[in-house]
Amino acid sequence: MATSTADMRLSGGHPALDFTNTVDSRRGRWGPDFLRSFADLLVLADRLDLVDQQAVACLRKQAEDNPSKAAAALADALALRESMYRLFLSEDAAEPHPVADLRLVEDWARRGRAQQVLVANEAGYAWTSPFDDLSQLVQLFAIKAVDLLMERDRRRAVRECKGSNCGWLFIDHSKSGRRVWCSDASCGSRARIRRFRSRVKGT
């Protein structure tokens, strides 16, 4: 069983959804929370290839030198995560996006975009954050959320895993488009085991 952002499954199909999935369970029970420090957020961003090693080192040093700022950035990240979760959960329910949550995500993304610079890379050019402030990592996840929202007409809807004690969000990339679990190997397997035991018990 995963205990942190270092070993949690990345099954959302998009960085924004993996960010919302940093709570182990949202159905039946809530928690545990994998984001317990700014370092946890940085580990996740690193695993998702959102930051290079230079940025990781820079942000880690800033967090170590300014624990109060790191705590504030973590609090902001948690608030953003919950707004993003409600925002994308509304897609699964085929409901309008919650306006307050949309505005909060928009605000964080707008601030992040304003600080990004265009840099050359192996693929040509890309927007990147200078990462001279801890809040820019929070802004980066908001930018990813807006990117996912803007791709709505080119992708399938975000779904909520129906597994017991889950509730993670994911994009169904399967051929049939009928996935109901974030992972067939975890939630899907547990559901099949429960059904089998129920049938055996009923015989």
Image (cartoon, grey):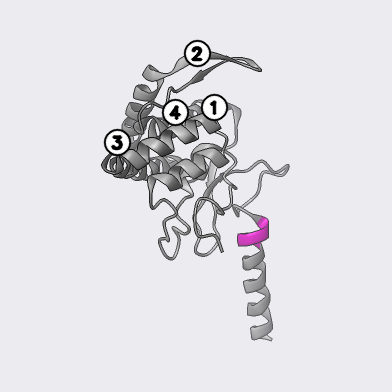
Say what amino acid the circle numbered 2 marks: Leu
Looking at this view, is 132 or 136 the one in front?
A: 132
For label 4, the residue is 143
Residue 199 position, x and y percent, is: 67, 79
> First in sequence: mark 3 or mark 2?
3
> First in sequence: mark 3 or mark 4?
3
Q: Is residue 93 visible?
A: no
Say what amino acid the circle numbered 3 marks: Ala
Q: How far, Cα to Cα, is label 1 from label 2?
A: 22 Å
Q: How far, Cα to Cα, is label 4 from label 1?
A: 13 Å
Q: How far, Cα to Cα, is label 1 from label 3?
A: 20 Å
For label 1, the residue is 151
Q: Residues within 10 Å of mark 1 (few under 14, many from 20)?
A: few
> First in sequence: mark 1 or mark 2?
2
Q: How far, Cα to Cα, is label 3 from label 2?
A: 30 Å
> First in sequence: mark 4 or mark 1?
4
Residue 15 position, x and y percent, is: 53, 38
Q: Please count the marks in the image.
A: 4
Image depth: mark 4 or mark 1 in front: 4
User: Mark 2 falls on what kind of element?
Assistant: strand
What is the magenta segment's predominant secondary structure?
A: helix
Q: Quadrant of residue 201?
A: bottom right
Q: Which residues are magenta?
A: 184-188
For label 3, the residue is 100
Q: Residues within 10 Å of mark 2 (few under 14, many from 20)?
A: few
Residue 190 is a magenta residue: no
Say what amino acid the circle numbered 4 marks: Ile
Image depth: mark 3 or mark 2 in front: 2
- Quick check: 108 left or right of 177? left
- Callouts 1 and 3 close, C-beta under 8 Å: no
Image depth: mark 4 or mark 2 in front: 2
